[in-house]
Amino acid sequence: MLAFALLLSFQQTVADSAKARQDSLLADSARAARAASVQRLEAVQVRAVRTPAAPISERTLGRAELQREYTGQETPILLARAPGLTAYAESGSASNYSYMRLRGIDQTRINITLDGIPLNEPEDEGLYFSNFPDFAQDIHSAQVQRGVGTSTWGVASYAGSVNFESIPVGGVPRGGELRLTRGSFNTSRFSAAYRSGLTSSGLAGYVRASAQKTDGYRHNSGNSSNSWFASGGWFGARDVIKATLLAGLSSNEQAYYASPLSALRVDRRDNPFGNGGTDAVGDRFHQDLASLGWTRAITPAVSLATTLYGFDAGGWYDYPFGGGITGRYRLHSRWGGIISALDWKGASSSASIGVHASRYSRDHWLDELPANSRDYRNTGYKGEQSAFAKGSTTHGRATLFGDLQLRTVQFRYVPTANSAVMPQHVAWSFFNPKAGMSWRLSSALTAYGSVGMNGREPTRADMFSGADDLDSATAAFLLPLTRVHPESVRDVETGLVLQRPTLRAQVNLFAMQFRDEIAPIGQLSTLGYTLRKNVARSSRRGLEGDMLWRAAPRVTLLANASITDARIRSYTDDASGETFHDVTALLTPKLVTNQGVRAELARWLSLDVDGRYTSRMMMTNTNDARFTVPASFLADAGATFHVAGQSVLVRVENLLDRPAFASGYTEGDEPLYFVVAPRNLSVSTRFTF
């Protein structure tokens, strides 16, 4: 009897244990389903601009890929391994002001968003990533779309777009991390982050604070900065209410002038602002972003997401006038808007409708120090309204895609009081259609093609030829504001995508025809603005390839290449009055390649090796061989050590210690270059809890 009772007890225990495991699995499954639902609702605004079914050329970089090499470098430097993208920092290392070009077209022609929120400052359409130090630590993924891509919010996707997705807070586990970095050029960085995970009441949050400092490679090109990021909200079964705050405070030493080749032969760290310890010229800027969004799952297939956002940015930068007098240029920007997207996804079709409206103003003023006298104060105002509708449908092997956008923009200039210049106003309207089709040739191979058009207004710097203020003399030369025409591009893309369990490859052909392109002329204004002017006809054609191959269970090979032929049909040099025909557009390399190896050598050690080749770039639009940025090949390597759940990343940039130039321009008869730092080292430790 005792044995029988023990047997019954054992059977009951086994049954209870099995039921407990089943209940646990059901609970885990429910939590996973809820997390997936929350993440889907969080990402509605991101899906609206990314449009997964669109037949476009793009590269999406996931968090693991971004963080694998990240030691605090500026975001454009981190993205430089995407196809067709080049980047550099004014300091020569990975800090201070940094810039990227896509297919040879500068950063002001690239649409940049965070969770759908437009980041480009409306007046000059650029983004200074140094205002948001350690930005990449908050990024879950980054998609680089090349060409006109799909409709998005903010400035036109003229060269392409980069849309960032922040770390989701509702569908991730609780935990935190500390990061400490030390590197060459007296570089240091501290960062702390914590995420709460989703609580039983539906609340979740994420916070991050960072501080970093570096001397930079070039003389007097240092940076000292702090930043904060916070995101959180309430996540219900059908609703998400989420708030986000991104704030940065940065002080950079001025290094926006390139150095003459003659000076670099004497001192490769030369800075035209001065090489002595007391010669540094500084700035100080803050930029803050606050947003509040509500996403509602109307049905399982339909979601509506609406976000209110606002920016505040301001600060000053100095410019030495000589004779003991310094000009302190001050800026203060305020802008905000609303974006809303209705997203529907059916069994074989999907659609998104989006609207955006924003208002912007920026004050410009100049004080002379030490007298602190005011020279001028003017204000620029800008408004934008846009709407798009896009959708795709699949029939058999074919998927059809369509995208229509209407965008209107207004700019108003209020001059300095008593300047004898009247207020100025100009408005533009753009209709931007896109269409395409993809065809599934097999289970692994898909062909696609698309056509599209985008129009884009000139920036304030384009209309003012780099001037910060209009007086009666400059107004006579620069006005009316319609003197600089808006530019447009017609883009045709076609390619193949191969997707296998161990291999993903894309090859893409593109042809971009520009009308009235506002092209750089290879010179800077006194204040560092790139000078540009309209050219009637220009084009960019090329071939891009991108491959990721898991060659072995622990070895992944990466490679991409971009071949670009950028032509200006006719260009007149303002200095000489001479006209040149069929010239190569400046700062557009004919060939850019990236190669990389990712190896998991052991459970505790991973290794990354990357190489990058950039062919020669012209520095003028005149085909003058005296003014070129020489071709270069640079290699980097990193080793990550994993110990007890923690990690240490040791990274070496410019592993082969190659002398190289990243960009440049001309002044008179001499080329000026931005240098690349020699071999340098950083060590970044990550503690998780």
Image (spheres, rainbow, N blue to C red):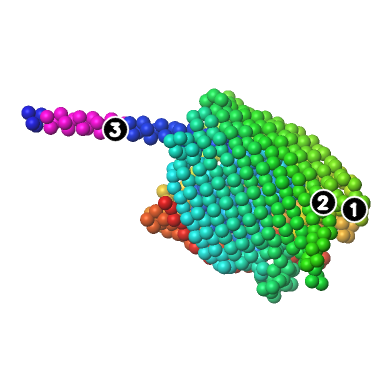
Three-letter residue code for mark 2: Asn
Q: Which mark is residue 20?
A: 3
Answer above or below: position of 9 versus 512. Answer: above
Q: Is residue 141 visible?
A: no
Question: Residue 15, position in %: x, y?
Answer: 23, 30
Q: Is residue 34 left or right of residue 541?
A: left
Q: Amino acid at mark 1?
A: Ser
Please tell me whether residue 434 is drawn above or below residue 677 in the rendered image: above
Residue 445 place in picture, x, y as percent: 54, 36
Instruction: Name the residue that disc number 2 marks.
Output: 378
Q: Are marks 1 and 2 in contact (CB under 8 Å)?
A: yes
Left or right: 124 with respect to 390?
right
**Residue toward you, 156 or 221:** 221
Percent position of residue 566, x then y: 73, 50
- Spatial distance from mark 1 to mark 2, Cα to Cα? 10 Å
In-front residue for pair 208/122: 208
Q: What SS does tag 2 mark? A: strand
Q: Position of residue 414 (x, y in %)?
A: 84, 47
Query: Residue drawn at (79%, 55%), measured in percent from left and top?
Result: 365
Whole-angstrom CA distance, mark 2 to mark 3, is 71 Å
Callout in the foreground (1, 3): 1
Examine the residues drawn in magenta and state their main secondary structure.
Answer: helix
Residue, disc 1: 419
Tell me which numbered mark, 1 or 3, is placed earlier along the sequence. 3
Residues packed near mark 1 inside 10 Å, few (<14), some (14 to 19) or many (20 plus): few
Range of residues picked out in magenta: 5-22
Amino acid identity at mark 3 = Ala
